[in-house]
Amino acid sequence: MIPKKRKELTPEEAFTRLAAYCAYAEHSPHEVRTKCKTYGISGELCDELIERLESEGYLNEKRFAHAFVRDKYRFNGWGPLRLQAELRRHRIASHIIDAALEELDEEEIQGESPLLALLERKYRSIPQGLPPRKVYERLTRFALYRGYPYEEVREAISELLADSSDDLGDD
């Protein structure tokens, strides 16, 4: 099968498409560069388009980082280590990542950390009858993958397993 030859976009058409892409959802400059490649836009033109998108308010690294952290924390249950790694993958500057994670810390102080709730949900999905060590390992692996620091994970699992053994009713 012969691939279709893509029509060359004019700079204005490219800007219009990228503006629509950025208006639909928050995107990082790295994602926009990737989109430029799919459109067959050269590196220099892509840089110019990104500058124009930023100047016209379609693209903003800080806004992207804050929205990314807020959404992934709330809806995916990601911890600070995973958030930091994913933002680095988007090539966001360190000082912007730090500012977005500080906002997360302020939010955590106001509400309860989702780690324990996340572990409780996972604990209910683990088959009954597994040795306690296996349960501990599965919960630990799960929470570490989600991006929570080991010490917090260890404490939360200990609390969860202590609570669950109390619920068993040692008659």
Image (tube, rainbow, N blue to C red):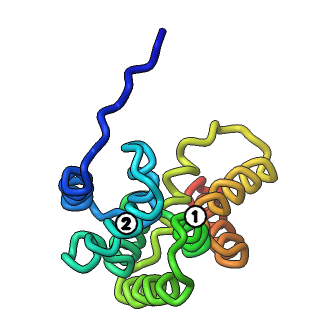
The quarter holding residue 32 reads bottom left
Q: Quadrant of the C terminus?
A: bottom right
The residue that disc 2 covers is 74
How far apart are the two marked residues, 1 and 2, measured between alpha carbons? Answer: 20 Å
Residue 18 % position (x, y):
26, 56
Amino acid on which disc 1 is placed:
Arg
Q: Secondary structure at mark 2?
A: helix
In percent of width and height, residue 105 lies at 46, 87
Vertically, is 111 above or below 132? below
SS under mark 1: helix
Q: Is residue 116 visible?
A: yes
Q: Position of residue 57 (x, y in %)?
A: 21, 76
Q: Which residue is mark 1?
A: 89
Q: Residue at x 41, y 44 (%)?
A: 40
Any part of residue 79 in sight: no
Q: Amino acid at mark 2?
A: Arg
- The residue lying toward the viewer, choosing from 101 and 123, is 101
- Looking at the image, the residue that sits furthest to the top is 1
- In the rendered image, which quarter is residue 166 located in? bottom right
- The structure residue drawn at horizontal position 72% and vertical position 73%, both measured from the top left corner, is 150
For the residue pair 169 and 1, the one nearer the viewer reads as 1
